[in-house]
Structures are given as structure tokens and as C-alpha cells.
Amino acid sequence: MKKQIAIIFIFISVGVCIFSCSSNGNHQAESAADISPLPEDTETFRDMSVFHLPAKWQTQEGDHITLSEFKGSVLVTVMIYTACKAACPRLVADMKDIQKKISDDTSIPVKYLLISIDPETDTAERLKEFSIENDMAQSQWIFLRSTEENTREFANVLAVRYAEISPIDFSHSNIISVFDKDGVMQHQMEGLAVNNEETVSVIKRLAGNIN
């Protein structure tokens, strides 16, 4: 089983890197990249679900979970760190703007995941504080932290590059990713403060909200 999971995510990492090869991996605003959805509902792509990842994550509430617990929900994900003063506040604003445009009354629930690239600093308590400070304490907002290994693995799936450039600062890609209810990536939005019309449209379609 472990061998099968490893093979699956080699394909995921390669595929997502192809989609996001234009990322420049730093805090500077990046040009928008319209990334085509993956092929429709084939068994091959069902097997590439992030729900197969066995990694354990801790939420802002201190709960320990795996991504498989989000099966059945559309996931909108971004990787940030709470001490960031440059790109991350803009990414958070972008996520909130997307959320405002999606009705809460969808046939498939939508969850907004913010994954820390600085798990040592971003404890569950700090993530909880950050969620409150940014008016993101509602149940659809999920903040996650894990080990450095697990965080790197998930970043590779998203084609997010990040590196510590000082004890309190990271350089990182600015990418928001959308996964369908089966955990298969369907769309990515690259850059800061870019037009999110296509991203919102994809989420509405996946969540059963076409209004």
C-alpha cells in the first residue's frame, strides 16, 4: 500500500509541477496563470486524490486529522505562515474574497484550508489566534500544521516552493489550489490580487452552485 501511495504521488508531483512551472517562488506578485482543469473523472485521476496522503495534521482547534476527513467537500487551499508581512496577508485577502463570492448554500460543502509552512512557530494556539484576528473563525476555515516532512510533501503536490531566508521570513510561491470532492486537483490560481473570476466559477461548478 505504501508503495502504491508513493507511486501515485510521484505522478501528482510531476503533473502539478507541469501546471505551475511559471511560479517564481518568492514574495513578489506573480502574473496570473490560467491552469486548465485535469481530465474529467477518469479512474486514473481518481487514484491521484490527496485523500490518499497518510500524513497527520493538527488544526487550529488542536485536533489531529488526515486529509481524508475532508472527503465529500470541495477544498480551496493555500500555504502561508502567520508571521508573514508581505505576500501572506494578500493571499489571505484573496481567500476571503473568494469565500465571499461562494454561497454557503451549496449541494457540496466548501472548505478553505490554510496550511502553515512554518509549523514550528505556527502552533495550534497561534493558528487559532490568527483565525480570530482575521475574522476566519467560522467552521469553513481550517488552519493546518504538521511536521516539516509532511508540509514539504504537500507543498510538492501543490507545486509550491518555499525556503527559509531568515529565522522569521520565508520566500514562497503564491498559489491557491482547488480540489474536488474526491480530492483531485481541478484548478490553480497563481499570483497576488489577480482576477479570481475563473477560480470562483470552478468552485461553484464543483460545489453544485451555479448562481
Image (cartoon, rainbow, N blue to C red):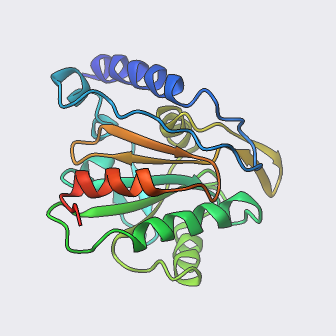
Pick whichever, 66 or 155, lies toward us. Answer: 155
Residue 156, relative to residue 44: is it above or below?
below
**Quarter occupied by the N terminus:** top left
Image point 37% across, 21% down: which residue? 6
Left or right: 205 in relation to 159: left
Image point 63% across, 48% down: which residue? 191
Residue 204, relative to residue 15: is it above or below?
below
Image point 24% across, 51% down: which residue? 206
Image point 35% across, 16% down: which residue? 7
- Counting every numbered tag in the picture gives 0
Residue at the far right in the pictured view: 166
Task: Give x and y (percent) for residue 88.
Answer: 66, 61
Pick whichever, 56 or 69, lies toward us. Answer: 69
Pick whichever, 88 or 127, lies toward us. Answer: 88
User: In this view of the protein, can residue 102 be seen by the observer?
Assistant: yes
User: In this view of the protein, can residue 66 be seen by the observer?
Assistant: no
